[in-house]
Amino acid sequence: MTQQQTSNRAVLVVIVLASFLPSFVGSSLSISAPAIGMEFHAPAVSLGWLIAAFILCSVVFVLPFGRLGDLTSRRTLLVIGFLILTVTSLIIVVFVSSFEWLIFLRVVQGIGGACIFATNQAILSDAYPPNMRGRVLGISISAVYIGLACGPVLGGLLTHNFGWRSLFVFIALWALVTLVAACIKLPPNSQVRAPGKLAEQLDLPGCFLYLLATFCLAYGLNEVPRLYSWPLIAASVIFIIAFIAYENRALQPLLAPRVFKAGPNFLLSSFSALLNYGATFAVTYLLSLYLQQAQALSADVAGLVLVTAPLIQAIVSPIAGRLSDRYSPFRLASLGMALCGIALVSLVFINEHSSLLHIFISLAVVGSGFALFSSPNTNAVMSEVPRADYGIGVSFLTTMRNLGQLSSMAVITIVMSLIIGTTPMDMTTPEQIVSITRTCFIVCIAFSVVGIFTSLNRRSRKSQGSNR
């Protein structure tokens, strides 16, 4: 094995460690949400902020951080992200005494998450040649799903036996280990920044408009159906238009136009990711509530059930990544979205007496479909992006994923508001939980159907272009 191969494998190990943690945090908090809500007497409708606060900050900051990583050091940004996760997790363990304080620290963790999301896959794509990109991205994405698989199981066990704060002890330790590994093993950027002031190259006016647009959109989506959410969403549209107009004239734009010049596939792939995450992100959160509140399972048992989908994803993702190096990633991604839609249809029919076999089979199909979508879709996006813009390409894709996740959580918030209002979690009935779950899955099916069409259209456009 050559020195370069050894170095690349070290990069892969670090990125695998980095990819595991954010997904573990989200899935473990989903299983622990009822316990947190009961300790702080928080309304059930507010518990979604445990996940949404992290995602919101990731949406707002990931694109500027991706550009900053391209211009400076992706390794440094990754290290900063894990430093933030380490420190805030320890603060949560020792000092948090209210639900509002916990949500604030989850916002800060979202900034750390943006540093990680903006850099990890860009570092990996830069380390390996294009003919191996699908394979290593599949391994990296498999680590994400292992995190999702471990979250419900380990999160349920820790919450059941030691309380939900023990989750953040684990998070702090994992973040610290990854931080040290990144400092030792990751190389600096292979790209050399062009001469000039960093502030000018970072496009600060563009960053400001982007931050305003994404914050208004993300926060507005998460606050629907409250009255003030609609002006926020309307303001986001105005800021988005202003951002696009400014970027078209900027000398050093935040979102380089060359990223989009290869054709529509970059945008369609990113939009397909938004729709697929919008359709599937709610599954773990909803079934966590359903299993614990409607079927009265303990957190650790519910976690063992929910591990099905991410376990299948972890197994299938490397295979899907390899296949996307050989066959059309567009066709594989479309097949994956179709499988997710089939699983969501089956979940619409659950009730408080549904068998666990029904849940297991549905989760297995979701896991297979999502794995077939995710790795090939990421490979398709990266194949459209110039190497110097890997950070911004990954960040834009991550922004679309996170907006999809926020859309999924917004659906949950809206449906909960309509069905139970501000009722505390411990006062909801099994019938109400089932009604919430079914209604949300119907909306998620609509996301999935639209996503299947955009994914297929992306493939046909490419084919037409090649024919010409």
Image (spheres, rainbow, N blue to C red):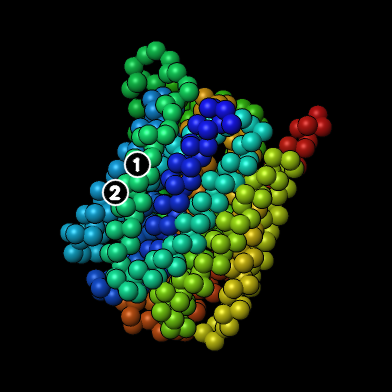
Q: Nearer the viewer, residue 107 or 458?
A: 107
Query: Could you tell me residue 156's position as x and y percent?
Result: 40, 70
Q: Secondary structure at mark 1?
A: helix
Query: Could you tell me residue 18's position as x and y percent?
Result: 43, 45
Left or right side of 456 for 267: left
Residue at image x 51%, y 40%? Answer: 12
**Picture layout, residue 333 above or below residue 186:** below
- Give the residue at the far front of this rendering: 1
- Quadrant housing residue 378: top right
Look at the image and tell me in which quarter the C terminus lies: top right
- Give the residue at the far right of this rendering: 467
- Give the residue at the far bottom of this rendering: 353
- Evaluate whether residue 227 shows in this view: no
Q: Which residue is mark 1?
A: 179
Q: Which residue is mark 2?
A: 86
Task: Name the kind of residue labelled 2 in the image.
Answer: Thr
Query: Could you tell me residue 99's position as x and y percent?
Result: 24, 64
Task: Name the kind of residue labelled 1 in the image.
Answer: Leu
Q: Nearer the viewer, residue 250 or 231?
A: 250
Between discs 1 and 2, the one toward the N terminus: 2
Left or right side of 173 for 352: right
Are circles 1 and 2 on residues that touch, CB within 8 Å? yes
- Quadrant housing residue 327: top right
Q: Secondary structure at mark 2?
A: helix
Residue at image x 63%, y 31%? Answer: 130
Look at the image and tell me in which quarter the N terminus lies: top right
**Picture layout, residue 390 above or below residue 297:** above
**The label number, if any, that marks residue 403 in the structure image:** none
Q: Nearer the viewer, residue 209 or 427?
A: 427
Residue at image x 69%, y 40%? Answer: 325
Q: Estimate the spatial distance between the alpha carbons at disc 1 and disc 2, rounded to whole Å.
A: 9 Å
